[in-house]
Amino acid sequence: AQTVTQSQPEMSVQEAETVTLSCTYDTSESDYYLFWYKQPPSRQMILVIRQEAYKQQNATENRFSVNFQKAAKSFSLKISDSQLGDAAMYFCAYGDYGGATNKLIFGTGTLLAVQP
Amino acid sequence: DGGITQSPKYLFRKEGQNVTLSCEQNLNHDAMYWYRQDPGQGLRLIYYSQIVNDFQKGDIAEGYSVSREKKESFPLTVTSAQKNPTAFYLCASSNWGRGSNQPQHFGDGTRLSIL
């Protein structure tokens, strides 16, 4: 069964600095998707970024980028120029490709604090 | 605007009572999902539905029931058999199809507590 591990329960970053959140996963599949979701204090889950495993190029969305290491089964999120609004819980998630469902498996989350 | 609406925002359950959480989407998505979120844990899948009149158990379905009579609606009933229902419940939806994994869009959630 697939698993997702986020080993950093909490992280802190100074405003305007860069922070990297870690995520590792385990799967026997060769094709899959990986996601980072953000959950601010409002509790709504917001998709931050998505990576297809068959793409070697790392995904980027404005200040958010990933470092996808397929062999190491690692999928870290880098937030550049951190802003106060980035403070939230961040969840890493794994999804099957070509499977019968779009089920997602979530990690336990990393709570990011942004210091002014 | 398209989106997912969950209601109520807060819900209280008495012992032995069934309660139903509402989830409606106007995104024309085929698939809908219910997750439970507890402190210190990620989201855990309760039930999911890929098409009207069909649904599947997720990882923690015991004590819950669902229906999918309309494409846009996927209500979750927390039955009296669920002995620890206090949690935050999130509903999600996505397009669905083999060979793809469409991002899931989430509602604002319902917090359920025991009286």
Image: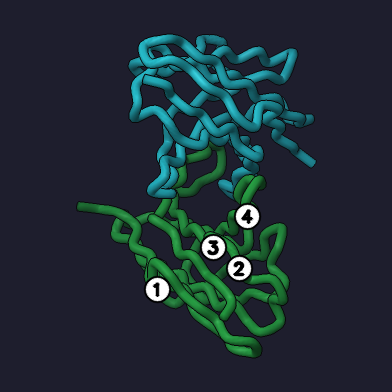
Chain colours: A cyan, B green
Q: Nearer the viewer, mark 4 or mark 1?
A: 4
**Extreme-bottom residue of the structure:** B16
Q: Earlier in the sequence, mark 1 or mark 2?
A: 1
Residue B47: percent from the left, percent from the top? 60, 63
Are labels 1 and 3 on one chain? yes
Q: Which residue, given by chain and number where applicable, does mark 4 sit on?
A: B38
Q: Earlier in the sequence, mark 3 or mark 2?
A: 3
Q: Chain of mark 4?
A: B
Q: Which residue, given by chain and number where applicable, does mark 3 sit on?
A: B49
Image disc number at residue B86:
2
Are labels 3 and 2 on one chain? yes
Are labels 4 and 2 on one chain? yes
Q: Residue at x 52, y 33 (%)?
A: A90
Inter-mark Cα distance, 4 to 1:
29 Å
Q: Which residue, given by chain and number where applicable, does mark 1 sit on?
A: B70
Q: Earlier in the sequence, mark 4 or mark 1?
A: 4
Q: Secondary structure at mark 1?
A: loop
Amino acid type, residue under disc 1 in the picture: Lys
Residue B3 occupies quadrant: bottom left
